[in-house]
Amino acid sequence: MSEQYQNGKAKAVKTVANIQVVVGIIAGIVAGNITRDFSWSIAIYVWVASIFSTIILHGFAEVIELLSDIYKKINILEEIKNKINKPVA
């Protein structure tokens, strides 16, 4: 998709996904430090969950962008169809 046009809702979802990565990294570090020694298994679990949900959110944002692009193209086709079918006076 061109960089000139991007749906605002899709951009918001991508921003939330990017924030989630940062929060997930910090949460993994905090969760890993719960025990006396750093628990890598807990930290990795939190990081993987964060990455997985971020990928899902990015995919959802891409679907929003593609649907928005399809909607735009359908509207253009409808305008063309209406101009072609316009009665000539």
Image: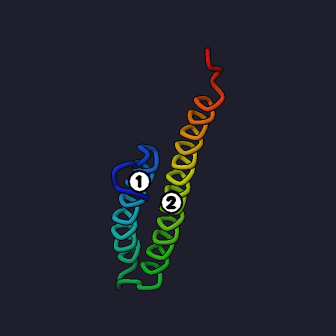
Q: Quadrant of residue 85?
A: top right
Relative to 81, residue 36 above or below: below
Looking at the image, residue 48 lies above or below residue 64: below
Residue behind mark 1: 16
- In terms of secondary structure, where does tag 1 sit? helix
Foreground of the two, 18 or 78: 78
Q: Amino acid at mark 2?
A: Leu
Task: Locate residue 19, reporting x and y percent.
Answer: 36, 58
Of residue 58 and residue 41, the one placed in the foreground of this image is 58
Q: In the rendering, which numbered label is found on residue 29?
A: none
Q: Position of residue 3 (x, y in %)?
A: 34, 55
Percent across and percent down for residue 81 are 63, 35
Label 2 crowding class (10 Å Cα cut-off): few <14, some 14-19, many 20+?
many
Q: Residue at x 45, y 81 (%)?
A: 44
Q: Position of residue 42 (x, y in %)?
A: 46, 79
Q: Which of 67 and 85 lies nearest the eye of the viewer?
A: 85
Q: Are marks 2 and 1 in contact (CB under 8 Å)?
A: yes
Image-based side of 73 in relation to 47, left or right: right
Comes first in the chain, label 2 or label 1? 1
Q: How is the image coloured?
A: rainbow
Instruction: Give the quadrant of the N terminus.
Output: bottom left
Identify the residue at horizontal 39%, vertical 57% (top origin).
Answer: 2
Q: If the image is split into quadrants, where does the C terminus sit? A: top right
Label 1 amino acid?
Val
Q: CA distance from mark 2 to mark 1?
A: 8 Å
Q: Which mark is residue 57?
A: 2
Residue 68 vertical placement versus 46 (above, below): above
